[in-house]
């Protein structure tokens, strides 16, 4: 079994200064925390959320990982790659009809050795994970079960490390972090590291429930009421989902392609594109006070571009 030293002794991801007119014009300092560069396949917030889960699985002597996700899930792909690298066998429960392994995400997971079992999207969405395992006759004995999106309490300390690393690199805590929100775990984890600064979560889902999800996670995961960060530390904005999960509009794609051309930084259309788009809009609206330092967290997700382009015709460059 491979050891997990790479998880513990990994160098910090780069903190890249980015020039964007609207930020410079308002005296704002903009940086991108390049977590997409942490690992070729376990990148972005996947690395952060899986780190303490994998350490715990190893501590418990468990050799198998079971998890859940949609057919294009970044999380499934990352768990498959992490299993291969760190010596866990992996099983993925996929929500959606068996659309075949030509889907780049599932093809990649399979290549990494992940076994895939398919269920309906409704089952994945509505059934608690232990019920789903029972229904599919999957015995979790000897396995470490990770929820969809890796969004459990062990995800939070890894995300908090984004704040610690950035503060060490910058020499001070930045005024704002901005991250995409799917389950809210990354935002919740970041907020636990803040003292007076603000983390903004850009929900990629339609609806106004994300703030509540973040609060629920913090209440469930933190040992005492006093450890729960000030509610002002984690603010969700719900206006940049572009119609809902994996929905998009041409202006989002134009923004992503333009951002890459100007900065060299690739963004995905499901998560980081929406979060970074939101940051620019907020700057334009005068949301940030003059002189503020703003760190955009690049949460990865770049593996999803191939599947997106396959469906919509090579529009993300
Ligand atoms: C690339 C990417 N960014 C952001 C998120 C959202 O993170 P969270 O689910 O922790 O809110 C996800 C989903 O996990 C993701 O795959």
Image (cartoon, rainbow, N blue to C red):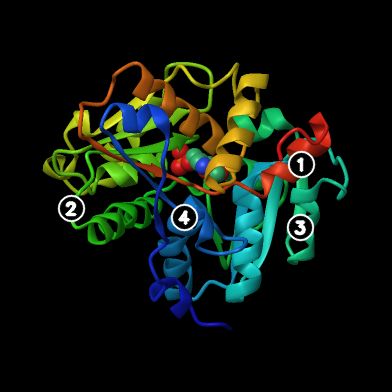
For the residue labelled by badge 1, is the local secondary structure a helix, a strand or a loop? Answer: helix
Q: Is residue 167 above or below residue 98?
A: below
Foreground of the two, 219 or 110: 110
Question: Where is mark 4, residue-wise?
Answer: 35
Residue 103, position as x, y percentages in the image: 82, 45
Mark seen at residue 246: none
- Separation of residues labelled 4 and 3 (CA atoms): 21 Å
* Crowd tier of the residue under label 4, counting other residues whose Cα lies within 10 Å: few below 14, some 14–19, many 20 or above: many
Question: Where is mark 3, residue-wise?
Answer: 108
The quarter of the image holding the N terminus is: bottom right
For the residue labelled by badge 3, is the local secondary structure a helix, a strand or a loop? Answer: helix
Residue 16, position as x, y percentages in the image: 40, 53
Is residue 148 among the parts visible in the rendering?
no
Residue 52, position as x, y percentages in the image: 40, 63
Q: Residue at x 66, y 71 (%)?
A: 84
Question: Where is mark 2, residue-wise?
Answer: 172
Question: Where is mark 1, residue-wise?
Answer: 307
Badge 1 residue CB within 8 Å of ligand 1: no
In this rendering, the label closer to the viewer, 4 or 2:
2
Of labels 4 and 2, earlier in sequence is 4
In this rendering, the label closer to the viewer, 1 or 3:
1
- Separation of residues labelled 3 and 2 (CA atoms): 39 Å
Q: Are marks 4 and 2 in contact (CB under 8 Å)?
A: no
Residue 26, position as x, y percentages in the image: 28, 26
Q: Residue at x 37, y 50 (%)?
A: 153
The quarter of the image holding the C terminus is: top right
- Separation of residues labelled 4 and 1 (CA atoms): 21 Å
Foreground of the two, 288 or 126: 288
Of labels 4 and 1, earlier in sequence is 4
């Amino acid at each position: 079994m491979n050891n997990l030293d790479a998880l513990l002794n990994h160098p910090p991801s780069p903190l890249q200064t980015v020039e964007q007119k609207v930020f410079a014009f308002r005296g704002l300092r903009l940086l991108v925390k390049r977590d997409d560069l942490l690992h070729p396949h376990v990148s972005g917030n996947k690395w952060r959320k899986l780190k303490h889960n994998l350490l715990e699985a190893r501590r418990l002597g468990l050799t198998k990982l079971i998890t859940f996700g949609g057919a294009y899930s970044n999380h499934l792909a990352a768990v498959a790659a992490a299993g291969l690298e760190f010596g866990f066998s992996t099983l993925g429960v996929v929500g959606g009809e068996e659309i075949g392994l030509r889907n780049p995400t599932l093809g990649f997971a399979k290549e990494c050795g992940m076994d895939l079992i398919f269920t309906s999207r409704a089952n994945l969405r509505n059934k608690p994970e232990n019920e789903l395992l029972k229904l599919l006759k999957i015995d979790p004995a000897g396995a470490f079960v990770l929820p969809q999106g890796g969004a459990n309490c062990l995800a939070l300390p890894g995300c908090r490390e984004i704040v610690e690393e950035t503060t060490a690199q910058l020499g001070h805590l930045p005024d704002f972090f901005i991250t995409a929100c799917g389950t809210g775990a990354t935002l919740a984890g970041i907020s636990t590291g803040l003292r007076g600064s603000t983390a903004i979560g850009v929900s990629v889902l339609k609806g106004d429930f994300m703030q509540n999800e973040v609060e629920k996670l913090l209440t469930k995961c933190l040992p005492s009421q006093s450890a729960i960060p000030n509610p002002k530390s984690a603010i969700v904005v719900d206006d940049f989902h572009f119609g809902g999960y994996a929905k998009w509009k041409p202006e989002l794609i134009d923004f992503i392609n333009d951002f890459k051309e100007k900065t060299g930084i690739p963004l995905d259309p499901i998560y980081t594109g929406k979060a970074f788009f939101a940051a620019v809009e907020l700057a334009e609206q005068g949301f940030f006070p003059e002189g503020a330092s703003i760190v955009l967290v690049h949460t990865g997700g770049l593996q999803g571009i191939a599947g997106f382009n396959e469906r919509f015709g090579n529009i993300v460059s």
